[in-house]
Amino acid sequence: MNDALTSPDESGRSDNGGQPAMQAKPIQDLSEFEAKAKQVTSLKTGTTSTLAVLRWPFSKISRIVEWLFGVVSMIGLLTICAAIPILQFMALGYLLEISTRIVHRKKVREGFVGIRRAARIGGFALGTTLVWLPAYNVSGIYHDAHILLADADELRPFDINLSIVIMLTSVYTMWAWIRGGKIRHFLWPAPIRFFKSVFKRDLYLQTIEDFWIFAASLHLKELFVLGFCGFLGAAAWLFLPVLLCIGGTQLPEGLRGLATLFGLPLLALVLVYLPIMQTRYAVERRFKVFLEIKETRAVFKLAPIALWISMLSVWAFALPVYLAKIQLTPREVFLLPTLVFVIFAWPSRILMGWAYGRAYKQKTNRNIISIWLARLAIIPVVSIYAGVVFLSRYTSWYGDWSLFEQHALLIPIPLLGG
């Protein structure tokens, strides 16, 4: 009985739809669904690729705009840092880091360090400024009303309006900061997200953590140490020749000519070695580099023409800042001298990193002709620059002591307005 139920009949067919048991079709055929799924997937992939192609030029343009904005922001940040006594070492450290990156990574574009992060900080500052412009205007109206109106009852509406605008602007600004502080966060407040997450504790904890991660990525401590040590090494070499040059006017009359006779050539000689020494320190991070004269001469022999070009840029680009020291800088434009300093120091450090990088990867000395041509060509360059430095004490607001302001290798002090 059971055999009759489970065995196929004489024609080789079973009870399953009259088809052979091993060849029976499934009740639900999924092949059509699989074909449709593949078709939908291909349509989605094609749509995604089409959108990616259409989005590509806008993405490229936005990245270029962001990079250019980052360059402007970096110039602004370095300008501010170069005008503040302690932060000046960070500005110098950044300029030395430029040369280091180019040498190690062998690409000139590595001279633009931290541009994306600078764009982030610049967007933060720009967005905050734009958001507070209405409050600033309302504050001006309030102060005008305070001058024109003597009655307290008449002033009360202006006071209330100003308080409301400041309160709303503060909340709007804090919300933009919490979301990341980018330009788009200041332009659109995302109200739905605000009401959903404003009372969640995790949001604020994540914001604090992201802030410290971003702050750590700036490597401010490393830049400060690099700039401070680079400053000390160069200042130690410049101290004696600059002091002798100052003695040309401060010493008794019989010693003035002698001090100038020794001080000016010694200053020119020191200027030949210092740019290479300072760059070597930035690359190797060894303070002993400032004592290695023989090794510095050996580096020059590896890429004499390139190093001559870079040192020419260092001294030539340092000259415009001396024009800013003729008069005491007014407080209204006290950042102008440091702005000039940053604009000209940045490309000179890039060229210095490029030249030292060529020497860094070179194993053998260049031919003797190029070495001596570069040596002879560097003499008039440093002589002219040393002469300008020597004569700048007669045009600088700070007189003889302005000779210590060797902004080409040190920090641009004291350039704050009086």
Image (cartoon, rainbow, N blue to C red):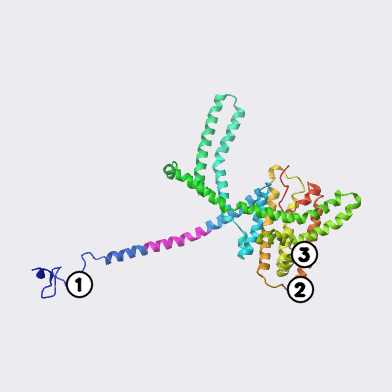
Q: Residues within 10 Å of mark 2 (few under 14, many from 20)?
A: few
Left or right: residue 202 versus residue 371 is left
Q: Magenta stretch mostly in which secondary structure? A: helix
Left or right: residue 216 versus residue 335 is left
In the picture, the quarter occupied by the N terminus is bottom left
Give the percent coordinates (x, y) of residue 374: 76, 68
Whether 206 is among the magenta residues is no
Q: Residue furthest bottom?
A: 11
Q: Residue furthest front?
A: 288
In front here: 278 or 350?
278
Residue 378: image tag: 3
Give the percent coordinates (x, y) of residue 171: 50, 39
Label 1: state its secondary structure: helix
Tell me the kind of residue under disc 1: Gln
Q: Circle 2 sits on which residue?
A: 369
Residue 145 appears anywhere in the view: yes
Label 3: state its secondary structure: helix
Residue 190 appears anywhere in the view: no
Q: Is the Cβ of the residue at disc 1 closer than 8 Å to that at disc 2?
A: no
In the picture, the quarter occupied by the C terminus is top right
Label 2: state its secondary structure: helix
Query: Which residue occupies 49% across, 43% down?
Result: 175
Q: Residues within 10 Å of mark 3 (few under 14, many from 20)?
A: many
Tell me the kind of residue under disc 3: Ile
Whether 45 is among the magenta residues is yes
The magenta stretch spans which residues? 43-60
Q: Circle 1 sits on which residue?
A: 23
